[in-house]
């Protein structure tokens, strides 16, 4: 019965995915993405047919689920808001989950030989989808979307803690809290942007240095280059006899070996720095703004917390969509840790006020 219930769930998911891909394909302007969405819609329809036939063979008839308008337009809105990279990452989340579930089903339940072969082909299809989505993420610079989300999250959490702590010190001077928060925010944004620039640039320079070294190595000694490749393959855990054969065959292809041993980082350090810095400043604006509008820090504080908590929840949803983890768990984690840090900061501010009587200055 457990297998039957899982098969019903798989049928529903595949059918809905097929309809979703078809809908996105009908609305997509990018020719390559449109063709891929349409192809994936056909593939998912075949997967749904497998699960429908699986259930029929066991005497069960299933109805095709209704594809809700809200779901279709929510994904379309995600496509418009986050761009192709964002919606591709959302779809990849579903595909990665399907691979794991199908593999567990394949190994845990009794299937005939035909069903086992068909399900194995479906798993291969889903893995192929993941490869496609990985390529699309690189094509549309999804790594900068990651920079933006993480930068905004850092700005939110750090400045929420700062202004909350200052609220306990400057109860009757909310503008001092707001100005102090802006100063800290601008400094933090510059620090984050510079850190992102240096990090991405350093990684690119390391990769370029490795590539240059390998090019020299190939020109001077192909045998030495082959030994270098062999050593890397052995380090990865490949059996010695297999690694030796692979290294020997690949050694004649200089470009292939260089691509294998020196990853080509596609990130741009300037773009990464701009995304991170601007996102940090955007995150700063939510907890800081109420202090310029309220007459008391204690009036601004709950508004600041409410704004920051709401945005943290939205950021958590975006992070979970991009990483494929549970939305509920990520929202709970980010909101609770962000507000928890604010609470501890407030207590620390009260302690400083009690010890040094700063608010009386």
Image (cartoon, rainbow, N blue to C red):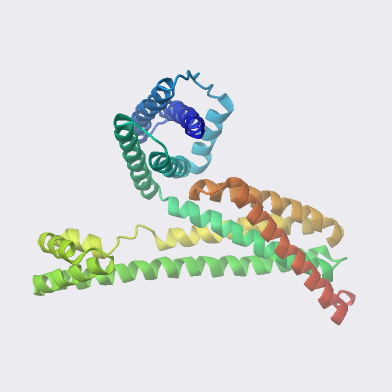
Indicate left or right for 321 with 45 as reference: right
Find the residue positioned furthest to the right: 360
Residue 185 figure quarter:
bottom right
Q: Residue drawn 56% across and 47% down?
A: 326
Residue 232 figure quarter:
bottom left
Indicate left or right for 135 with 150 as reference: left
Position above or below: 324 against 203: above
Which image quarter holds the C terminus?
A: bottom right
Q: Nearer the viewer, residue 42 or 111?
A: 111
Indicate left or right for 111 with 180 as reference: left
Position above or below: 229 against 101: below
Q: Residue drawn 71% across and 62% down?
A: 160
Residue 284 visible in the picture? yes
Find the residue positioned furthest to the bottom: 356
Residue 34 position in % (x across, y down): 37, 31
Residue 179 visible in the picture? no
Residue 276 position in % (x across, y down): 52, 60
Residue 236 position in % (x across, y down): 28, 65
Q: Nearer the viewer, residue 336 or 13?
A: 13
Residue 221 position in % (x across, y down): 9, 74
Position above or below: 239 against 46: below
What is the total number of numbered labels drawn onto the structure image?
0
Q: Residue drawn 40% across and 21% down?
A: 57
């Amino acid at each position: 019965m457990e297998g039957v219930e899982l098969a019903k769930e798989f049928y529903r998911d595949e059918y809905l995915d097929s309809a979703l891909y078809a809908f996105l394909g009908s609305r997509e302007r990018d020719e390559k993405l449109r063709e891929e969405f349409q192809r994936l819609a056909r593939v998912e329809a075949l997967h749904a047919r497998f699960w429908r036939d699986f259930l029929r063979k066991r005497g069960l008839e299933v109805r095709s689920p209704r594809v809700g308008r809200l779901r279709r337009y929510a994904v379309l809105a995600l496509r418009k808001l986050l761009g192709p990279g964002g919606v591709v990452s959302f779809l990849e989340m579903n595909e990665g989950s399907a691979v794991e579930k199908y593999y567990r089903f394949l190994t845990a339940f009794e299937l005939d030989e035909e069903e086992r072969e068909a399900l194995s082909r479906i798993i291969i299809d889903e893995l192929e989808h993941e490869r496609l989505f990985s390529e699309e993420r690189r094509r549309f610079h999804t790594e900068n979307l990651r920079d933006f989300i993480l930068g905004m999250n850092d700005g939110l959490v750090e400045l929420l803690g700062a202004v909350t702590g200052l609220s306990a010190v400057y109860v009757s001077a909310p503008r001092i809290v707001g100005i102090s928060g802006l100063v800290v925010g601008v400094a933090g944004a510059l620090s984050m942007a510079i850190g992102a620039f240096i990090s991405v640039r350093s990684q690119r320079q390391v990769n370029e240095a490795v590539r240059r070294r390998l090019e020299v190595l190939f020109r001077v000694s192909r045998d030495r280059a082959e030994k270098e490749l062999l050593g890397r393959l052995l380090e990865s855990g490949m059996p010695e006899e297999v690694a030796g054969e692979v290294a020997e065959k690949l050694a004649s292809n200089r470009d292939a070996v260089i691509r294998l041993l020196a990853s080509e980082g596609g990130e741009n350090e300037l773009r990464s720095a701009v995304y991170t810095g601007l996102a940090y400043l955007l995150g700063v604006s939510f907890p800081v703004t109420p202090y310029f509008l309220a007459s008391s820090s204690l009036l601004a504080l709950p508004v600041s917390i409410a704004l920051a908590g709401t945005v943290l929840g939205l950021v958590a949803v975006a992070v979970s969509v991009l990483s494929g983890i549970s939305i509920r768990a990520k929202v709970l984690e980010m909101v609770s840790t962000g507000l928890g840090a604010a609470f501890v900061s407030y207590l620390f501010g009260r302690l400083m006020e009690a010890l040094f009587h700063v608010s009386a200055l």
